[in-house]
């Protein structure tokens, strides 16, 4: 990642008073309390660094037209816009049952200005929104219920020579990272019968998940005339992140977060994870380009 760009984002994030934003968002209507909203906001801000790291090699020294899918509270879109990039963000969170993101985004805009279109990816058209040189998302694809139509729309608004980059879980690996529970292999929805209590506590999240797999992404790529490449080493990087990112570590279930207390365990597991084929590992990072290029 370009050091100066990363440093500038970190400085921007440190200026944000998460507690004040959360209190303001909580006061906008019923729903999550300020402490819960503060935890959500800290997660979104932390993931902005992941998003920048994901796309930095693509935007280094260039000024492409960028589209962020699932901008959340809008912080990365706001940052890249302030850095001079031509970026559009979309976030249909309220429609998907995550209306608190709109309240957080509105409260956050008092500190960091950001304009996000409240639409889903399936609503994008070249006529209305133009075409983009870079399209990306971080932990969004698994929540897109109309994934077939969304991928078709994204293919249409991807400019010739453009690139899509997405980071999301791969449910070919039987684990649900939002809830921190193992899944029944090849039948993830059936897990609801054996993990009822855990799922009920986070029912909204469970209901939003589409259980996307690398295989489904490959099929959608072919159907829309795109070539797909799955990045290796992502699962190992996930484990490495446990050691270096305390906010990320705090979001994990106890047994996973606790691995860092066992000397050498994370390193050993990360090495083993590098042997797993990218199409079977989770999370997955995949890039898409028009096949004719």
Image (spheres, helix red, strand yellow):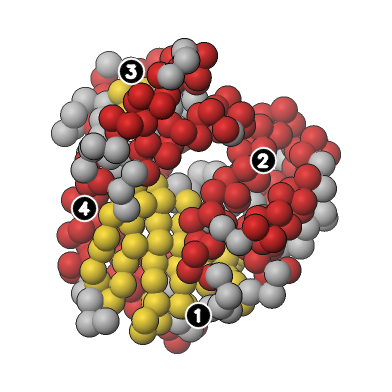
First in sequence: mark 4 or mark 3?
A: 3
> Where residue 41 is drawn, which disc sits there?
2
**Image quadrant in which you'd find residue 26:** top right
> Where residue 195 is drawn, which disc sits there?
3
Residue at mark 3 to residue at mark 1: CA–CA distance = 42 Å
Q: Secondary structure at mark 1?
A: helix
First in sequence: mark 2 or mark 3?
A: 2
Q: Residues within 10 Å of mark 3 (few under 14, many from 20)?
A: few
Point out the frontmost of discs 1 and 2: 2
User: Which residue is located at x 53 percent, y 70 percent?
Assistant: 59
Q: Secondary structure at mark 3?
A: loop
First in sequence: mark 2 or mark 4?
A: 2
> Where residue 216 is drawn, which disc sits there?
4
217 or 148, which lies in front?
Answer: 217
User: Which residue is located at x 47 percent, y 13 percent?
Assistant: 262
- The relative height of residue 250 versus residue 169 in the rendered view (above or below) is above
**Image quadrant in which you'd find residue 280:** top left
Residue at mark 2 to residue at mark 3: CA–CA distance = 27 Å
Pinpoint residue 47: horizontal percent, then vertical percent. Answer: 57, 45
Pinpoint residue 9: horizontal percent, then vertical percent. Answer: 70, 55
169 or 148, which lies in front?
Answer: 169
Point out the frontmost of discs 4 and 1: 4
Q: Residues within 10 Å of mark 2 (few under 14, many from 20)?
A: many
34 or 15, which lies in front?
Answer: 15
């Amino acid at each position: 990642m370009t050091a100066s760009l990363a440093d500038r984002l970190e400085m921007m994030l440190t200026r944000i008073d998460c507690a004040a934003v959360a209190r303001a968002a909580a006061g906008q209507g019923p729903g999550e309390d300020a402490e819960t909203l503060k935890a959500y906001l800290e997660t979104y801000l932390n993931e902005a660094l992941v998003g920048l790291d994901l796309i930095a090699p693509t935007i280094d020294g260039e000024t492409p037209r960028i589209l962020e899918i699932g901008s959340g509270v809008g912080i990365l879109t706001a940052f890249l816009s302030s850095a001079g990039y031509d970026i559009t963000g979309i976030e249909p969170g309220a429609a998907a049952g995550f209306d608190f993101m709109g309240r957080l985004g509105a409260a956050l805009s008092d500190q960091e200005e950001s304009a996000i279109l409240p639409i889903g990816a399936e609503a994008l058209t070249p006529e209305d929104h133009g075409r983009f040189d870079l399209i990306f998302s971080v932990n969004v694809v698994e929540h897109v219920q109309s994934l077939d139509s969304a991928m078709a729309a994204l293919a249409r608004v991807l400019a010739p020579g453009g690139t899509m980059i997405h980071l999301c879980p791969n449910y070919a690996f039987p684990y649900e990272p939002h809830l921190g529970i193992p899944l029944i292999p090849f039948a993830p929805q059936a897990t609801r019968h054996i993990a009822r209590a855990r799922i009920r506590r986070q029912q909204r999240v469970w209901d939003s998940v589409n259980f996307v797999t690398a295989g489904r992404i490959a099929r959608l790529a072919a159907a829309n005339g795109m070539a797909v490449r799955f990045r290796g080493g992502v699962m190992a990087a996930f484990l490495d992140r446990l050691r270096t990112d305390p906010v990320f570590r705090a979001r994990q279930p106890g047994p996973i977060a606790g691995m860092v207390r066992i000397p050498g365990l994370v390193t050993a597991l990360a090495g083993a994870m590098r042997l797993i084929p990218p199409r079977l590992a989770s999370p997955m990072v995949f890039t898409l380009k028009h096949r004719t290029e």
